Image (spheres, rainbow, N blue to C red):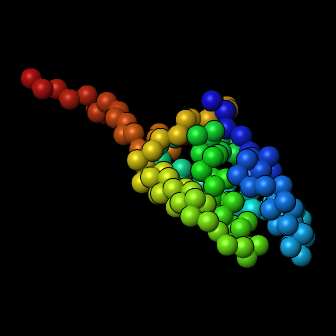
Amino acid sequence: MAWRTTTSDDLAARLSDMEIESFRTSYTGKGDPVELLLNDTAALFRDAIRTGGRSRMSPKAGALPESAISKAMDYAAFDVLKRLDVPINEDRRRARQDAEDFMHRLEEGRFEVEDDETPGGEDPRLALTPSFTPPRPPRLLD
């Protein structure tokens, strides 16, 4: 399955349009803060996947596997709410904790996401697989 980059629509599945818009208007820097947050979150989850070394990484920067996008958006949604300085309910706190736990499982290699099918993807498993060559010169055992 191909990996994909996250969009503001993915974040909108976790937050209301009003929360996202408030986050955008509270930002005084350059660029779209939602885009910056999505990029940072994707980089964090990609690092966890790479550290775990169990899945073929996508060569496309910011791309995540479908199985990780939901948890990544729970993680990002919490950051939006912290910025807005609003009370965060227990369900959203639990979703953030679940996302952090998921990220730790990825880092420890206890959860394997689907490989990226895009040509040119990096396969960290190849670095872990030993390879043997025949001895030179051939051994004569008799």
Identify the image quadrant of the N terminus. top right
Going by the image, does 22 lie left or right of 84? Answer: right
Q: Nearer the viewer, residue 75 or 109?
A: 75
Answer with the quarter of the image where residue 58 lies: top right
Give the image location of residue 98, x and y in percent: 51, 56
Identify the image quadrant of the C terminus. top left
Going by the image, does 64 lie left or right of 16? Answer: left
Answer with the quarter of the image where residue 111 lies: top left
Query: Would residue 60 be visible to someone looking at this image?
Result: no
Going by the image, does 23 lie left or right of 57? Answer: right
- At 69% from the left and 45% from the top, the residue drawn is 63
Query: Would residue 92 be visible to someone looking at this image?
Result: yes
**Residue found at the far top of this picture:** 142
- At 54% from the left and 50% from the top, the residue drawn is 49
Q: Nearer the viewer, residue 117 or 94?
A: 94
Q: Nearer the viewer, residue 27 or 115?
A: 27
Give the image location of residue 117, x and y in percent: 63, 30
**Residue 20 in the image: above or below residue 52:** below
Going by the image, does 73 lie left or right of 97? Answer: right
Answer with the quarter of the image where residue 4 lies: top right
**Residue 15 in the image: above or below residue 82:** above
The count of marks equals 0
- At 36% from the left and 40% from the top, the residue drawn is 130
Give the image location of residue 12, x and y in percent: 77, 50
Give the image location of residue 122, x and y in percent: 59, 41
- At 67% from the left and 38% from the top, the residue drawn is 3
**Residue 76 in the image: above or below residue 65:** below
